[in-house]
């Protein structure tokens, strides 16, 4: 380190070097990180190597200062680092901790395929889920499922059927579970079921019914939000929902639900077709699949839907 420093200061005393250039070199030499770099590679550095690298050293110091002051750098989200290549010093840019966290979150979100879900559900996390005595059973059941599924996803895992009044956090909790499962590397399809049923009716005209059903029924993890809020339809019940749930039951694929109805109330809802026909056996058959795939978890408490 000393021989490099002596060479620098001898060089700086050359009257032919402009004051501005000498000031730049002085700033470089006084930088603590540059000094640490010189110390680390003292045996491999020479005056010639350092002189050839002034522009890179200057870039390093300048970019570092911009980041410290909160100014825009030439590579936003990345920080400069010095490296020693063959015969010269270079600057490489690596993601900041903030950038890496943002990219990780982006990757996690890509593992959750949301269909017609609000932003707060798409970005939900368990950390931000407000805890209360009324919500605690649902939170504990959710954590148990996440731990169990991440520990051994190949065996049967009965998912959860959250039911309760409006605004108690059922949809948000589904989104938070999906986020936690994404952290374990799993893919989730989270959809607003009433909207999905309308899209399926429109798919008849575009001849994409089977394609849409296949995409949903084969999802690694499926979450049907607000089931029971859809308009009654014999075709949706038997040819869409029935087909999806039958496949998922046979393939043992985790399937979550949220509803304002208990399972018994949902069965009553499903009995009635769009023509007014009462079909209790078809409703019971469908509920057998839902009960196989999930178990009822009540959620109560105050309506938080309009809280900031």
Image: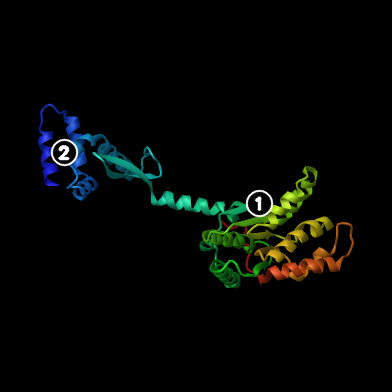
Residue in the picture at 26% in, 40% down: 86
Real-space CA distance between mark 2 and mark 1, rounded to the nearest whole angstrom = 61 Å
Mark 2 crowd level (few <14, some 14–19, many ≥20, 10 Å Cα):
some
Q: Secondary structure at mark 2?
A: helix
Residue in the picture at 46% in, 50% down: 102
**Residue 98, numbered label:** none
Q: Nearer the viewer, residue 230 or 284?
A: 284
Mark 1 crowd level (few <14, some 14–19, many ≥20, 10 Å Cα):
some
Question: Along the horizontal axis of the image, is 60 left or right of 4?
Answer: right
The residue that label 1 is drawn on is 115
Q: Quadrant of residue 233?
A: bottom right
Image depth: mark 2 or mark 1 in front? 2
Residue 184 seen in the current view: yes
Q: Nearer the viewer, residue 37 or 304?
A: 37
First in residue order: circle 2 vs circle 1: 2
Q: How is the image coloured?
A: rainbow
Question: Along the horizontal axis of the image, is 223 left or right of 275?
Answer: left
Residue 259 seen in the current view: no
The residue that label 2 is drawn on is 47
Residue in the picture at 19% in, 49% down: 39
Q: Position of residue 1 (x, y in %)?
A: 14, 47
Farthest-out residue, top? 16
Q: Is residue 56 above or below residue 248?
A: above
Quadrant in which the C terminus is drawn: bottom right
Q: Position of residue 258 (x, y in %)?
A: 68, 63
Farthest-out residue, front? 86
Q: Position of residue 125 (x, y in %)?
A: 54, 60
Q: Secondary structure at mark 1?
A: strand
Question: Along the horizontal axis of the image, is 13 left or right of 278?
Answer: left
Determine whether label 2 and label 1 are within 8 Å by CB: no
């Amino acid at each position: 380190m000393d021989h490099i420093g002596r060479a620098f200061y001898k060089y700086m005393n050359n009257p032919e070097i402009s004051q501005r250039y000498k000031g730049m070199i002085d700033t470089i030499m006084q930088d603590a990180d540059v000094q640490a770099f010189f110390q680390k590679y003292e045996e491999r550095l020479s005056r010639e190597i350092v002189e050839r690298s002034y522009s890179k050293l200057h870039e390093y110091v300048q970019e570092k200062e911009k980041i410290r002051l909160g100014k825009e750098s030439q590579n936003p989200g990345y920080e400069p680092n010095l490296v020693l290549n063959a015969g010269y010093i270079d600057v490489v840019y690596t993601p900041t901790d903030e950038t890496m966290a943002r990219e990780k979150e982006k990757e996690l979100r890509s593992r959750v395929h949301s269909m017609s879900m609000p932003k707060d559900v798409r970005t939900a996390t368990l950390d931000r889920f407000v805890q209360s005595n009324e919500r605690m059973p649902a939170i504990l059941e959710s954590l148990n499922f996440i731990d169990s599924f991440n520990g051994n996803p190949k065996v049967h895992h009965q998912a959860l059927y959250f039911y309760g009044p409006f605004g108690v956090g059922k949809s948000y909790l589904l989104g938070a579970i999906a986020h936690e499962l994404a952290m374990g590397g799993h893919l989730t399809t989270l959809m607003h079921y009433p909207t999905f049923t309308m899209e399926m009716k429109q798919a008849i005209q575009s001849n994409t019914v089977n394609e849409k059903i296949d995409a949903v029924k084969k999802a690694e993890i499926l979450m049907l939000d607000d089931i029971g809020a859809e308009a009654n339809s014999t075709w949706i019940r038997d040819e869409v929902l029935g087909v999806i749930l039958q496949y998922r039951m046979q393939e043992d694929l985790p399937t979550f639900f949220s509803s304002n109805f208990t399972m018994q109330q949902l069965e009553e809802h499903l009995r009635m077709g769009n023509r007014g026909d009462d079909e209790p056996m078809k409703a019971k058959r469908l509920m057998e699949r839902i009960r196989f795939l999930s178990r009822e978890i009540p959620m109560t408490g105050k309506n938080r839907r309009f809280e900031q």
